[in-house]
Structure formats: C-alpha cells, structure tokens
Amino acid sequence: MANNLTLYSWGTPNGHKASITLEELGLTYKTEQINIMTEIQKEPWFLEINPNGRIPAIKDGDLRVFESGAIMLYLADKYDKDYKISYPHGSDLYYEMLSWLMFQMGGIGPMQGQANHFVAFAKVRSDYGIERYVNETKRLYSVLEIRLSSHDWLAGDKFTLADIANFSWVRGAERLLIDLGEWPGVQKWVDRIAARQGVQRGLNVPPQTRTPEEMKEMFANMRNRVASMENTDKH
C-alpha cells in the first residue's frame, strides 16, 4: 500500500516502539532525527506535529499521529491488512493485544521511566524514589512472567504490537542493574524478540552513534554519579 510516511524520532524505548513497528510491517518511510538532548522537540515547527513536544511522532501525508501507542495502532489499522503483528479489530485476541499494549503504556513505560530518572538522570539523590520505582518495575516484570512462563507471546500465538511495546522497555533492564534471569520466561521472550531481523533494524532507527559497550559505560557513569551523592530524602 502506498504511503508518505515520515517518522520523527530518537533512540529511546518509545521511539523504538514506532520504528520496530514500521520495520516489522516492511513499510518504506523517511526518518527525521529529533535529538531530544537539544530540545528541538520543543520548537514551534515540531509542536505543530506533536503539541506535547515528545517523540516519536509520524506524518502520513498531511495526517499527524503522536504518542507511541497511537502510532502503533494507526500503522496496524492502516497497513497491517494481513495481520502480521496484530489481530482483526473487535476480535477477542485484538483486545488481549490491546490490554498488554496498555499495560506497557500505563505501567512499564511510566514506572521504568521514573526508575531510569532516579537511578541515572536525577540532579539529586532520592533513595525513596530509587527504591519505589525500581521495585515497581520489578513487580511489573513479574506480571509479564505470569504470562510468559507458559506462552511464547503476550497475546495469542504470535508476535504482535503488545510484544513490541513491552520489549522496547524491558530490554533496558540492565541499565537499572535488574537481572532478567529472575524471570526466565521474560528473559527467553526478550532473547526471542531480539533475534528478529525487523526488530534489529528498528533498534537502529535513527542510526546509533554509540556502540553497545559505550552505552553501557555511559549509563554506568550516570548511575555512579547519582550513587555518589548524599541522599536528600527527609525522614
């Protein structure tokens, strides 16, 4: 199906949700790199695409779609006519897929995002914040394990949007020093998804500027910076 897709993104979990979806569907698209460290996403031209000033966003011709989950659903609704990574709208499995997608959007994304902030990005150290959000992230991984301990995929018997969304975040557990070996089903699921060619292509959109080793070292330094501070919690 012909399209005029442009992806506005950066190499974050939410950005990868969109790029992996595009790659798994085999769609052609242009990429505009939005380096969020430069605050370009707050400029007026980008706010015309996403008023919230966040990545990712897409345009399909004159149509804009923002928020990563909305982008995924749009791409599946419009372009996944063979249901490669989705299910027919209104079917039981569609709503199972949607439930796990919303689980990521309302749970793993916000909670792990806050864990990342308190562990590695915060300007002050809060042991309460670190414990609160790391533990909640682990609890949510345990919810995934309930399903993945006995099934290969989150919804039905195939790889879907639900897997893309949750994988994009869970693959970063190591940055929080979380060992996925605690959840064997989740670990096998992450490995299974990471081996997919479409996923590998999507994880390199936009092209990575650092090697995995450099990224690992960078996050270690960021964690160490926060850990070296004095706890600022008031008791």
Image: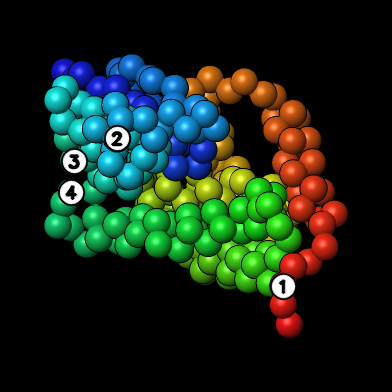
> On the image, numbered disc 1 is attached to which residue?
233
Q: Amino acid at mark 1?
A: Asp
Give residue 218's quadrant in the image: top right
Q: Quadrant of the N terminus?
A: top left
Residue at 63%, 71% (x, y): give it. 132
Q: Is residue 82 above or below residue 164?
A: above
Q: Provide the secondary structure element on which disc 3 rests.
A: helix
Tell me the mark number nearer the camera, choosing from 1 and 3: 1
The disc label shown at residue 47, or none: 2
Q: How is the image coloured?
A: rainbow
Mark 2 to mark 4 CA distance (whole Å): 33 Å
Mark 1 is surrounded, within 10 Å at the Cα level, by few (under 14), some (14 to 19) or many (20 or more) other residues, namely few
Question: Is the residue under label 3 in contact with that under label 1 (CB below 8 Å)?
Answer: no
Q: Amino acid at mark 4?
A: Pro
Tell me the mark number nearer the camera, choosing from 1 and 4: 1
Mark 3 to mark 2 CA distance (whole Å): 25 Å
Mark 1 to mark 4 CA distance (whole Å): 49 Å
> On the image, numbered disc 3 is attached to which residue?
77
Disc nearer the start of the sequence (1/2): 2
- 41 or 136, nearer to the observer: 41
Q: Provide the secondary structure element on which disc 2 rests.
A: helix
> On the image, numbered disc 4 is attached to which residue?
88
Disc nearer the start of the sequence (1/4): 4
Mark 4 is surrounded, within 10 Å at the Cα level, by few (under 14), some (14 to 19) or many (20 or more) other residues, namely some
Question: Is the residue under label 2 in contact with that under label 3 (CB below 8 Å)?
Answer: no
Q: Is residue 125 above or below residue 32?
A: below
- 117 or 197, nearer to the observer: 117
